[in-house]
Image: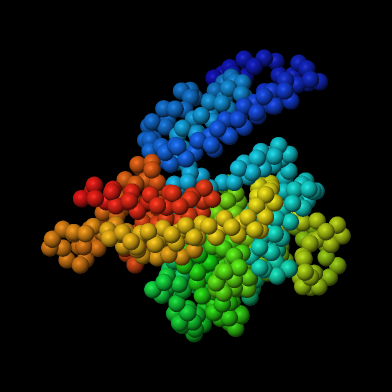
Amino acid sequence: MSADGDAERDTGPVCDDLSSRQAALEMSAEEFRATGRQLVDQIADFLQSLPSRPVNPNESVAELAALLPDTSLPQDGAPAGEILEQTASMLFDHSLFNGHPDFMAYVTSSAAPIGALGDLLASAVNPNVGAWSLSPMATEIEKQTVEWIREAVGCSQGYGGLLVSGGTMANFVGFLAARKAKANWDIRSKGARGGERAMRLYASKETHTWVQKAADLFGLGTDAISWVAVDDQQKMDLVDLEEKIAKDREAGHQPFLVVASAGTVSTGAVDPLQAIAKICEADDLWFHVDGAYGAFAAMLPEASADLQALARADSIALDPHKWLYTPLEAGCVLVRDAQFLVDAFSFHPDYYLFEDEDEAVGDEVSEPSGQGAINYYEYGLQNSRGFRALKVWLAWRQAGRKGYIRMIRDDIALARALADKLAQQAEIELFTQNLSITTFRYLPSRLPAGLSAEDRDEWLNELNRDLLKQLQSGGGAYLSNAVIDRTFVLRACIVNFRTTLREIEKLPQRVVEIGRGML
Ligand SMILES: *Cc1c(COP(=O)(O)O)cnc(C)c1O
C-alpha cells in the first residue's frame, strides 16, 4: 500500500453520513466574513503603502523558494484565515509591483482596485460564461462590456467580439477569423495547406511576437509572414507593403491579411492605418489592427486620424489589462461582424438555428435566433470561460468615458514631460516619444578613446544594458528596454494612473547617477 493509500485511510471512513457533509473546503458564513474582512483590511493597507515600498524586491530564486512552506504536498488542511494572512504578507513583501507609481515598464498597467473586488465577486458567483444558460446575467454583462469597448474606440454598430485572456489571444482570434474568412477552400476541414495557393500575411518588423506564434500554431508556418520594412519612425512602409503583396500575387501565392499596429510594443508607433485600410479594401485583404497597447487612446478627441482609423479594421485586438487598467487577465477582440467568429470557431451549428443563414450573416447582430442568447464558446478558443468581463465592466462604470480619457491623456502628458526633461540632460540621448512611451539612452559626456564607430555602438549598448539591470534591481524605479535599429535604449511606458510628475522628475537624475557610477 502506497503512502497515498495510508493518507486516505487516515481521513476516516468515507461514507458514514452523507446527509450532512463536512467538506474540507466549505466555510461558514461567519468564517468567510471574518476571513474576508481580514484580507480586505490587509489589502487596503498594502495599497496605501505601495509608494513607500521598493518597486522590485530583487531577491534570488533561492531566497524566494525558502519562503514557501517546507513540506511536500500537505496531507492535512489548515484554517483558511491563517493561510490567507500569511500568504498576503508573503506576496506584499516579495513581489514586483506594477501598481507602484515608479513602475513604467513593458505595457503593464497599474490595476484598478475595483477590478480586484470584481474578481472576488465574479469568483463568488462563478458563472461559466461559455454558455448563456450557465451564465445568464454574466453573459449579458460581457455583451455590454464588448459593446462599450466597441463604442469607446469608434467602431460602428454590428461589430461584435468577446473577452479573452490578453492581447496575444485577442490577436489569435482575429487571425483565425481572417484565415477562415479569406481561405477560398474549406480550411476548417482541409487544413491550412488544403488550398492551391499558399496564404501570405503582411506585418511590419515592429509587430509583437504573437504574429509568429499565430502563423506557427495555426498551420501557415512562420515563413507565411512577409516582413514589411518600417520607416525612420518605426511605422509600416507602404511602398514596401504594396510591393510585397504584388510580388506574392505574381508568385502565385494568396495574400490574405495585413497586420497593422495601433501603438507598437517597442516605441508606440501607430502605423498609417488610413492608408493600410485603403489598400486592404482595394485588394480584398483582411485588415487586422493590433491595438493591444494603443487602441484605447483612440478615445481621446485629440487622437490622430490614423489612430481613429482603427475603426475601419476587420478585426481589432485590445487589451483592457493595459490601458483600461483592469487586473490581469483581460483582453478583447472586436470583429466587423460576430458571424465571422461563429464561422471560424463554432462546431455546434445546432445552437444556431437561423431560419435563413445568409440573411443572418448580414444582420446587425449575429445571435442565435429565438431567444437572442450568445453562447460565447462559439465565438472563440475557450469552452468553459470565467467572468473576466465583470472587472472591465465595473471599471467602465466607476471611471466613465470621461475618467478614462483623463487617465490616458495624463499618462501621455507625463511621457511627454519625461521626454522634455530628458532632452534637457546633457548626458541623455532622446530617441522616440509616441503615445505614452519615451525611449532614450545614457550617453556619457566622454567615451573611451580609440573606439571605432561600430565598437562605440556596441559599448553604448552594453553600458545601457547594464544600467537598466542596475536600475531595475535598485528598487527605485522600473523601466524596460527597446531595440531601435540595433541600438539598445531604455524605455519608459506609462500606463499607470499612480504615476505623477514627481516620479517623472526624479527619473533623469536617477539614470544619470547610475550611469556615472558605472564608468
Ligand atoms: C502587450 C502587447 C501584446 C500582447 O498582449 P498580452 O496581453 O501580453 O498577451 C500584443 N501586441 C502589442 C502591441 C502589445 O503591446
Q: Tell me, yes or no, if residue 380 can be seen here.
A: no
Quarter occupied by the N terminus: top right
Residue at the extreme left of the image, as rendered: 450
Instruction: Tell me the quarter of the picture where residue 381 sits.
Output: bottom right
Tell me if 20 is positioned left or right of 345 in this view: right
| Count of numbered circles on the image | 0
Tell me if 475 is positioned left or right of 384 in this view: left
Q: Tell me, yes or no, if residue 455 can be seen here.
A: yes
The x, y position of residue 454, in whole percent, is 21, 66
| Residue occupying the point 39% across, 62% down | 420
Above or below, 156 against 246 in this view is above
The x, y position of residue 221, in whole percent, is 49, 65
The x, y position of residue 83, in whole percent, is 57, 25
Above or below, 419 against 387 in this view is below
Depth check: 23 or 394 in front? 394
The x, y position of residue 10, in whole percent, is 62, 15
Depth check: 180 or 69 in front? 69
